[in-house]
């Protein structure tokens, strides 16, 4: 009927199982060939961060308040004193300072050097002496009616031209004096602002130095503390050597053991499924056998009844059914060859308990970290002692660097800052007095300017050019008086002001030429570097260096923001390479690890007995033959009792004896009933058995390949454990140790770069020097020089102002005596000569 055609065509496909086994062997062969795969790169230790540099305040900047005067004043002072800084002369003066009387030769050299200032001073002294004398004699002369004192003005044809000339001369002179007066006001205010801000700027500069000097020890401590952090990190790793090193070894093992474990898990699952299918197949066979036995019994009973009926004499023509009845006994025995042996093999594999074998290997892998911890306990303890020695060696840096000198400098800075705070109120009071005096001077000069301007304005307003000088207007007369007042004030105050100009010129000019200018071009620092000039200034010997360090070199390095390592030549004092060289300790730690063997116990994945049982299991699965049972299932599916029943009905129809006829009909009916029972009971069971056989066949098909893969993977894994365990332990131990030692290599490189390139960037030191120069020279001295230069400017132009103001005043003042001048000439007519012709 074709019910079991799919089963009928089934046979054991051994080629698929062979292919799976071959693939497993190939993969494990590659695993063995690469049993020591390339090591992953050691995780790099995190590089320490750069040192935190202190935040500094903005220092003094060059102010453009009197910048327009600086170039002019400096050019003038360069003309007065073109000579460079007299180093030799200063050294001689310092050397002879303790003597009661200076050497006359030195005094002569000083006078020669200061010849420019002496000439200017002589001019100033002449001004101071002559100006009041000239003023006194001029006043006396004018009182006597001379020197323009007589209130009489001769009228000439050039009077108007002369008046205009004098007017514009006085105007230009007054404008020049006004410009100088404005510069006086501005320079005076600039100096006041400079002095007022100097305390704040000095405090900011000292604060920057304080921050710098405070940050240097902190930065050194940060470098040392970073070594402590490195040691602590390595110590933590050593304490966790089990989880770290053990896990790495475990992961190396898993690379080969995991495929074996996976294949064993797969076999265990297939064994469970096979066991379930075997039970299901056995149950299906038993159920079918029971049904077939019942059908067989029924058929046999009906057959016996038919034989009895056919044997009766009144059954006519019944002999022809004898041959048909011979086929009625059915072959109801259904068995599968080798199924019992296969079921026994399945039971034996179940008794192996592959799950326990898997757990045994997993427990072995999980125990590796703890075993590593136990085996390396003494090595870790010794290594931690070495790490303490490393910490002690690196901390020696703080002792070798002369940080105590910085503490002394800090104390000096604090004392200077306290002193600045103490004298600041007195400086403010003195500055207020100075500012007030200078404002008074500016106002007096402004008074002269105002007198001249009023005379220049009022004189022309009230002047009528053709008017009689004795009848000039009051406005014009006031203009002339203002001009005389300006000349009088000039005579009265100019010589006094010139004293101030002379004093400030000698002070500010020499400060600029002897201090500010050499400071700016570097000559001052070179002078300070001169041996013997300042006792005890040798920085090199103070720090214990082999060579001396000049102030100029320190300033130049700090100007480029160089670290203290190069600026102070600390490499002569500290052997940084030796301090950071921890190789002697790391080599001892490495030797300890090399001498210590981490031994892992041997483990047998699957015993030879278990392997034999698995091989037998695979062999039994291969030997199962479903051909016989398939044939019997096909035979059962072809049973058809209705054919015999139809023949019996045909014989019954020919019977004359009703009793025989009735018996035959009943027996035919029984056969049909049995056929119906076969179709409703036996055929579904056959279908169920067929489905079970197909499921069983698909599982049995995989068994051979899975068992082959298991045996191959387990064999490779066992060989790997037997031959590569010691090598893996050594390799991973060395890699773990290299990782830890790499922390110190990275730290040593970082510490070397940090100490030599980042610790103590001394830019604030050069900034402090520059700020001091800006505060003293660019702010105070330049403002002071601008003031005396502006005041001297005004004093010089007072001379032409006095002369031309006095002369111009006579053209505006009302005269007491008149002088007539008529520019109309009387022309006498001369008759033309006439020629008379006769």
Image (spheres, rainbow, N blue to C red):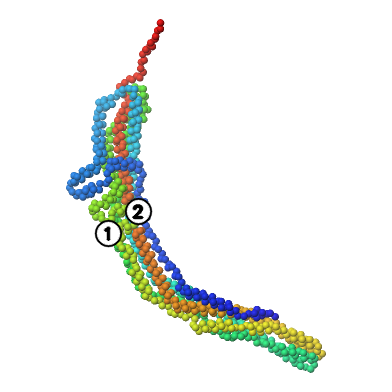
Identified at 31% across, 23% down, the residue is: 153
The image shows residue 447 at horizontal and vertical percentages of 32, 34
User: Going 37% across and 67% down the picture, which residue do you hit?
Assistant: 231
CA neighbours of label 2 inside 10 A, class few (<14), some (14 to 19), many (20+): few
Q: Indicate the quadrant where residue 285 lies.
A: bottom right
Residue 667 screen position, x and y as percent: 75, 88
> Which of the two residues, 281 or 830, is positioned nearer the viewer here?
830
Q: Of callouts 2 and 1, which one flags the residue occurring earlier in the amino acid sequence?
A: 1
| Residue at (35, 47) in percent of width and height | 62
Q: CA distance from mark 2 to mark 1?
A: 22 Å
In the picture, the disc for residue 395 is none
Taking 769 as reference, is 183 above or below it?
A: above
Q: How many marks?
A: 2
Specify whether 838 is left or right of 11: left
Given residues 453 and 525, the one toward you in this image is 525
Q: Of all residues shown, which one is farthest toward the front?
A: 838
Which quarter of the figure is the N terminus placed in?
A: bottom right
Secondary element under disc 1, as helix, strand or loop, is loop
425 over 331 or under it: above or below? above
User: What residue is pinned by disc 1?
Assistant: 545
Is residue 573 visible from the viewing direction of this image?
yes
Q: Quadrant of residue 166?
A: top left
Looking at the rendered structure, the secondary structure element under dot 2 is: loop
Label drawn at residue 560 = 2
Q: Position of residue 442 (x, y in %)?
A: 32, 38
């Amino acid at each position: 009927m074709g019910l079991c055609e799919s089963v009928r065509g089934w046979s054991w496909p051994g080629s698929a199982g062979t292919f799976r086994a071959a693939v497993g062997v190939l993969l494990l062969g590659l695993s063995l060939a690469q049993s020591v795969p390339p090591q992953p790169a050691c995780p790099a230790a995190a590089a320490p961060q750069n040192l935190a540099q202190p935040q500094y305040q903005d220092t003094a900047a060059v102010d453009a308040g009197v910048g327009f005067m600086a170039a002019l004043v400096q050019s003038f002072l360069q003309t007065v004193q073109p000579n460079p800084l007299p180093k030799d002369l200063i050294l001689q003066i310092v050397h002879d300072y303790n003597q009661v009387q200076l050497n006359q030769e030195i005094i002569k050299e000083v006078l020669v050097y200061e010849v420019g200032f002496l000439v200017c001073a002589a001019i100033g002294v002449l001004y101071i002496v002559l100006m009041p004398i000239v003023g006194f004699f001029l006043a006396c002369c004018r009182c006597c009616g001379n020197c323009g004192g007589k209130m009489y003005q001769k009228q000439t044809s050039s009077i108007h031209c002369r008046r205009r000339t004098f007017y514009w001369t006085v105007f230009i002179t007054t404008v020049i004096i006004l410009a100088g007066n404005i510069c006086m006001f501005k320079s005076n205010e600039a100096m006041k602002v400079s002095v007022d801000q100097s305390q704040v700027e000095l405090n900011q500069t000292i604060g920057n130095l304080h921050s710098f000097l405070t940050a240097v020890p902190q930065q050194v401590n940060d470098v040392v503390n970073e070594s402590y952090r490195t040691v602590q990190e390595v110590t933590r790793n050593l304490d966790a050597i089990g989880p770290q090193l053990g896990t790495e070894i475990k992961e190396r093992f898993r690379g080969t053991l995991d495929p074996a474990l996976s294949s064993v898990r797969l076999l265990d699952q297939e064994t469970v499924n096979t066991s379930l299918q075997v039970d299901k197949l056995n149950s299906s066979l038993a159920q079918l056998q029971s049904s077939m036995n019942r059908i067989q019994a029924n058929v046999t009973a009906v057959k016996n009844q038919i034989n009895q009926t056919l044997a009766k004499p009144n059954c006519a023509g019944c002999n022809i059914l004898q041959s048909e009845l011979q086929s009625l006994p059915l072959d109801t025995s259904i068995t599968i060859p080798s199924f019992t042996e296969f079921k026994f093999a399945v039971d034996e594999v179940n008794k192996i308990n592959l799950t326990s074998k898997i757990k045994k290997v997993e427990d072995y892998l999980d125990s590796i970290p703890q075993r590593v911890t136990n085996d390396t306990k003494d090595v870790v303890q010794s290594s931690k002692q070495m790490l303490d020695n490393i910490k002690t060696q690196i901390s020696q840096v703080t002792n070798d660097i002369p940080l105590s000198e910085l503490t002394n400098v800090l104390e000096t800075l604090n004392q200077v800052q306290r002193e600045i705070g103490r004298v600041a109120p007195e400086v403010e009071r003195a500055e207020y007095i100075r500012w007030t005096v200078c404002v008074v001077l500016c106002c007096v000069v402004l008074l002269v300017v105002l007198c001249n301007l009023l005379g220049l304005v009022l004189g022309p307003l009230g002047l009528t050019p053709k008017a009689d000088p004795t009848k000039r207007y009051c406005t014009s007369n006031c203009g002339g008086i203002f001009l005389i007042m300006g000349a009088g004030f000039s005579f009265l105050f100019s010589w006094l002001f010139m004293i101030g100009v002379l004093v400030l010129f000698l002070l500010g000019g020499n400060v600029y030429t002897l201090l500010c200018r050499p400071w700016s071009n570097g000559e001052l620092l070179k002078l300070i570097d001169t041996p013997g000039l300042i006792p005890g200034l040798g920085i090199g010997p103070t720090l214990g260096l082999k060579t001396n360090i000049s102030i100029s070199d320190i300033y130049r390095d700090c100007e480029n923001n160089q670290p203290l390592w190069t600026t102070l030549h600390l490499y002569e004092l500290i052997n940084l390479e030796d301090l950071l060289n921890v190789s002697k300790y790391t080599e001892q730690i490495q030797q300890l690890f090399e001498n210590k063997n981490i031994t892992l116990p041997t483990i047998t994945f699957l015993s030879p007995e278990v392997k034999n049982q698995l091989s037998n299991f695979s062999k039994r699965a291969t030997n199962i033959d479903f051909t016989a049972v398939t044939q019997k299932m096909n035979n059962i599916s072809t049973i058809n009792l209705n054919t015999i029943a139809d023949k019996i009905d045909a014989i019954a129809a020919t019977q004359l004896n009703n009793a025989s006829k009735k018996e035959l009909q009943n027996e035919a009916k029984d056969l049909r009933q049995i056929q119906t029972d076969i179709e409703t009971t036996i055929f579904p069971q056959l279908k169920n058995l067929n489905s079970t056989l197909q499921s069983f066949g698909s599982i049995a098909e995989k068994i051979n390949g899975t068992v082959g893969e298991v045996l191959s993977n387990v064999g490779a894994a066992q060989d790997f454990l037997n031959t590569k365990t010691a090598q893996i332990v050594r390799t991973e131990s060395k890699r773990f140790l290299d990782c830890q030692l790499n922390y110190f290599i990275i730290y040593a490189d970082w510490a070397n770069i940090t100490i030599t390139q980042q610790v103590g960037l001394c830019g604030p030191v050069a900034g402090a020097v520059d700020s001091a120069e800006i505060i003293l020279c660019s702010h105070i001295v330049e403002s002071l020089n601008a003031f005396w230069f502006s005041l001297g400017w005004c004093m010089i132009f007072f001379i032409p102002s006095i002369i031309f103001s006095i002369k111009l005043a006579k053209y505006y003042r009302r005269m007491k005596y008149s002088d007539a001048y008529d520019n109309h000439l009387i022309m006498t007519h001369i008759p033309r000569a006439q020629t008379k012709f006769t």
